[in-house]
Image (tube, rainbow, N blue to C red):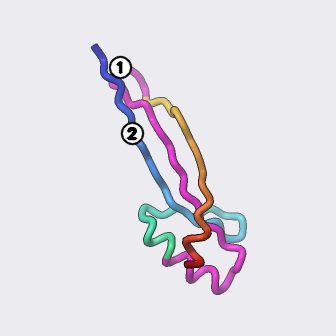
Amino acid sequence: MFEPKNKTITRYGLTIRGTDVYFSKKETAISIGKLSLIMNPETKMFEEYRLWDVTRSRRPKLIDEQRFDRTILLKL
């Protein structure tokens, strides 16, 4: 029998002047975001969460996708 397998992908990013810039690590997004706030106070930080079903019998299927505002982390 097939066992269902899930894979979670979390990405961090900044929205600077309407453009999304992605980073692989939260720490990098925070440090760049703090520098960006000095020049552009409208900078926002976000976290994207995607949950995939990666069972071997079929192609990967997106189960859930959410985007969270993490701008507060830039102001700490």
Q: Secondary structure at mark 1?
A: loop
- List x then y, in percent, for residue 36: 60, 80
Q: Which mark is residue 24?
A: none
Instruction: Quickly name the residue at label 1.
Output: 57
Amino acid, disc 2: Lys
Per the image, is 42 magenta? yes
**Part of the protein shown in magenta:** 31-59
Q: Place residue 70 in its image quadrant.
A: bottom right
Position of 59 relative to 67 (above/below): above
The residue lying at 48 percent from left, 64 percent from top is 23
- List x then y, in percent, for residue 53: 43, 30
Q: Within 10 angstroms of label 2, few (less than 14), some, or many (20 or more) residues?
A: some
Closer-to-camera residue (57/52) = 52
Q: Within 10 angstroms of label 1, few (less than 14), some, or many (20 or more) residues?
A: few
The residue lying at 43 percent from left, 61 percent from top is 24
The residue lying at 58 percent from left, 60 percent from top is 46
Residue most extreme to the left:
1
Q: Place residue 75 in its image quadrant.
A: bottom right
Name which of mark 1 and mark 2 comes first in the sequence: 2
Instruction: Quickly name the residue at label 2.
Output: 7
Residue most extreme to the bottom:
38
Amino acid, disc 1: Ser
